[in-house]
Amino acid sequence: MKAVQQDIDERTNLTSTNKFELLLFRLGTDTALNKSELFGINVFKIREIVAMPSITPIAGTTPHSLGVVNLRGQVIPVLDLPSIVGCKPQTGLNIMLVTEYARTTQAFAVESVEDIVRLDWKQVLSAETSGAKGKLVTSIARLDGNTDESRLAQVLDVEAILQMVSPSDGHEVTEEKVGAKLKLRPGSIILAADDSFVARSLIEQELKALNAPFEMVKSGKEAWDRLNAIAKSAEGEGKTVLDRVSMVLTDLEMPEMDGFTLTRNIKQDARFHGLPVVIHSSLSGSANEDHVRSVGADGYVAKFVAEDLAETIRRVLPK
């Protein structure tokens, strides 16, 4: 396990080349299929991996809560991930994954940690595209390349899991929180990309509250393809993309093309000169913020605070 932890420490500095590191782990036997499947979480979300410590139960907590642990002076809630996903551990809950997500720290109990693999986002398919129906899975990763024989891992939607286990009032979108309505160029939209259905729902609520016309897609590649289609259509009418799109709002972790690559593509293409891009992500930390600056994004906002997102959108929109 020390080797796995060392890999995390070294590889979180992976540059933005449409690649990422996926931590693979097992949760036990699936209660429906009676099989042990591989699951994954982006390494950037993992702060630490530790052998299961002593957990203090808390009275009156949610059904999937195991209690809390005191880890180096910080009290962290521990969630029973196999129970949440619908698996039964065969050897017990042996490992704890400490994660940082959307300004919060929490731990997930798992049965075992398998490996860390470096993948291209092209090896990852949207859960909807691949036929997976579970709302706790954002995508399916093909671990051995793009072949029919490739091993598969289910990439968990941490946003959906945390919202299911502990719904946050802080995520509520109201007109009071987002402030005055936006005024976009007539006929233009905000193009938003996110692979999490929870995030898409919150973004849609926010943009509707701001009275901002928008289109929502589920990956960076979809956003890139849509921008190219809009550019071609606008050119045929003697216009530019800026007449049709006022801003791009993108997540970082997405199947096929991540937000870093999408942003870099936009900023390096003369057709999109002057098009603002805001990165809206649960990935935080100085390394990610350095990457955001390096690809030329006009803004970065951590998920999900309605006021912060509205303020950032207003700041970057063309006057």
Image: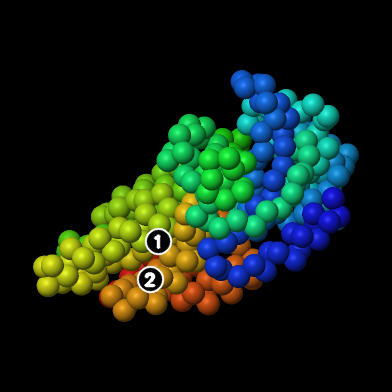
In three-dimensional space, the C-alpha distance between marks 1 and 2, rounded to whole angstroms, equals 12 Å
Residue at (47%, 44%) from the top-left corner? 126
* Marked residue nearer the N-terminal end (1 or 2): 1
Residue 21 pos. (x, y %) = 65, 57
Q: Secondary structure at mark 2?
A: helix
Crowd around label 2: few <14 · some 14–19 · many ≥20 (10 Å): many
Residue receiving disc 2: 266
Residue 203 pos. (x, y %) = 40, 51
Question: Which kind of residue does numbered mark 1 sit on?
Answer: Leu
Q: Secondary structure at mark 1?
A: strand
| Residue that sits furthest to the left in the current view | 237
Residue 40 pos. (x, y %) = 64, 45
Question: Which kind of residue does numbered mark 2 sit on?
Answer: Ile
Residue 14 pos. (x, y %) = 64, 67
Which quarter of the picture shows residue 84? Answer: top right
Residue receiving disc 1: 249
Residue 202 visible, this orientation? no
Q: Nearer the viewer, residue 92 or 159?
A: 92
